[in-house]
Amino acid sequence: QVQLVESGGGLVHSGGCLRLSCAASIIDFSIYTMGWYRQAHGNQRELVATITSADISNYADSVKGRFFISRDNANNSVFLQMNSLKSEDTAVYYCNAVYFFESGHRLNYWGQGTQVTVSS
C-alpha cells in the first residue's frame, strides 16, 4: 500500500524558513514525478513545485526564488525548502507522487498534508 507521509510543518514568523519532508513507501520511487501542492483555507489546491525523475524542477511563480524542491531516491524522500516565508504561504501542504504511462493512464498518490502557518 502506497503511503506518503509529510512532516516539517509548523508556525513560523514572516521571513522565516521551514523545510518540509515527505517519506514515500512506494515501489520504484525514482520513476515518479514528485510534487508539493498547497491548499489555503477556502481556496483550491494549487501546485507549488514538482521534480521529475530526471531531477527537472518546476515552480509556481509565487514561490520562485524562495522555495526549492529536492529528492533523495535512495531514501524515497522529497523535500521542500521554504525561505523568506510570507503570510500568503499559509496553507496545508501536500506531497504528491505521479507516474504517467504511455497509454495515458497514471498512478497518482497524495499524502495527508502538513499545516504551514506564517504569522505576519
Image (cartoon, rainbow, N blue to C red):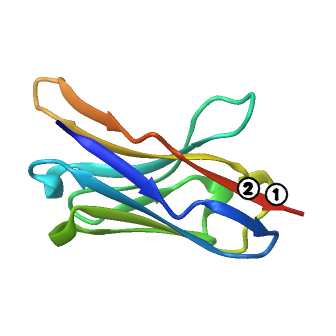
In percent of width and height, residue 109 lies at 31, 36
Foreground of the two, 30 or 11: 11
In percent of width and height, residue 25 lies at 20, 50
Secondary structure of the residue carrying tag 2 is strand
Work out whether residue 82 can be spotted: no
Q: Is residue 94 left or right of residue 89?
A: left
Task: Identify residue type, mark 2.
Answer: Thr
Mark 2 touches mark 1? (CB < 8 Å) = no
Q: Residue at x 29, y 63 (%)?
A: 77
- Earlier sequence position, callout 2 versus callout 1: 1
Residue that label 1 marks: 87
Task: Identify residue type, mark 1.
Answer: Ser
In percent of width and height, residue 110 lies at 37, 37
Query: Which circle marks residue 117 in the picture?
Result: 2
Q: Residue at x 43, y 54 (%)?
A: 6
Q: Residue at x 17, y 23 (%)?
A: 105
Q: Quadrant of the C terminus?
A: bottom right
- Give the residue at the far right of this rendering: 120
Secondary structure of the residue carrying tag 1 is helix
Foreground of the two, 52 or 14: 14
Q: Quadrant of residue 15?
A: bottom right
For mark 1, does the 10 Å Cα neighbourhood hold few (<14), some (14 to 19), or many (20 or more) residues? some
In percent of width and height, residue 89 lies at 72, 55
Above or below 100: residue 5? below
Q: Quadrant of the N terminus?
A: top left
> In 3D space, how far apart are the residues under numbered discs 2 and 1 (Cα atoms)?
7 Å
For mark 2, does the 10 Å Cα neighbourhood hold few (<14), some (14 to 19), or many (20 or more) residues? many
Above or below 92: residue 69? below
